[in-house]
Amino acid sequence: MSHLGALSKVSFDLGVFANVARQKLRRTFVYLLLLVVISTAATTTMWMLRLREGVRWLEPHLDEIPTITIRNGVASADVEQPWVKRLGNDDDGSEVVAIIDTTGTLKDFEPNQIGVFLKKREVVVKNKEQTRIVPLSKFPDTTIGPDIVRDWIKQAMRRAPFYIGGFLGIWYLFAKTMQALLLVLMALIGARTFRFGQLFTIAVYALTPAVILDSALPFTKLHIPMFWAIYWGLGIAYAILGAKRADAPPPPPPADAAVL
């Protein structure tokens, strides 16, 4: 049976486990890589859609960015200061702002604000968790304006799928392997006579329904609280039931076949 064939049948036919339980481990690892590719592709696509949505939201504001020059660790801008650009509110109600003030008139964000604050010799980045201060002496001499920012965004969007996909591929390979190793204990409940390699194969294939559901869910409008419980519930159920099916004796041949 091909890996794609198994992928399409595992969710509906537990008999697949009887066919794959005794296969060579290298085929199991290839199937595990297929699950990793599915998860990586789905999550990368989801993040790229969100990034493009963010770029579309940002685009109307780019022409409002003043031209900023950094020379010898000192910033200047061709705009009346303090310059405050309000970008809306986040989910917690904090106001998102971009501030330029190299005159020292403004000292800090207001209590309910987060965002970026460019001062004469440093840039302050504040989010809900922390405030980070970066001296401008760490930046090379440069000029930043609307066209330059657009070029940066275009370059970043071209590279983003490779960076995101590469990171997620490594992460999912580790995560799915660990999940399969944990499901080996569940498969042991259903088939105590199997060796580790057979149990690992059953565990990898048992991940299939959960991985497919997890990959499809972000592209729907459904929000399932505590989805992790459903994910693990599916994996555990398929590991136990699949191991029982794989360990069951084959059905006897039909009587007429025995006579022949």
Image: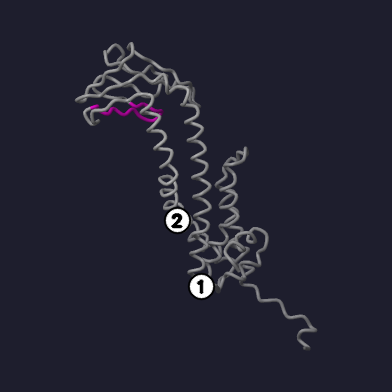
In the displayed structure, 172 sits above or below 160; it is below
Is there a contact, CB below 8 Å, between mark 1 and mark 2? no
Viewed as shown, does residue 140 lie left or right of 177?
left
Viewed as shown, does residue 103 lie left or right of 14?
left
The CA distance from mark 1 to mark 2 is 19 Å
Task: Name the residue furthest left.
Answer: 72
Residue drawn at x 49%, y 40% as measured from the top left: 47
Disc 1 designates what residue?
Answer: 24
In the displayed structure, 242 sits above or below 131; it is below
Secondary structure beneath disc 2? helix
User: Amino acid under label 1?
Assistant: Lys
Residue drawn at x 49%, y 70% as measured from the top left: 25
Q: Quadrant of residue 84?
A: top left
Q: In which quarter of the image is residue 188?
A: bottom right
Look at the image and give the residue range highlighted in magenta.
Answer: 125-136
User: Amino acid under label 2?
Assistant: Leu
In the displayed structure, 176 sits above or below 104; it is below
Where does residue 9 sit, x and y in percent of width and height? 65, 61
Disc 2 designates what residue?
Answer: 173
Residue 69 falls inside the magenta stretch: no
Residue drawn at x 60%, y 60% as measured from the top left: 7
In the displayed structure, 223 sits above or below 67; it is below
Where does residue 249 sit, x and y in percent of width and height? 66, 76
Which quadrant of the rendered structure holds the C terminus?
A: bottom right
Which quadrant of the rendered structure holds the N terminus?
A: bottom right
Where does residue 195 sit, x and y in percent of width and height? 51, 73
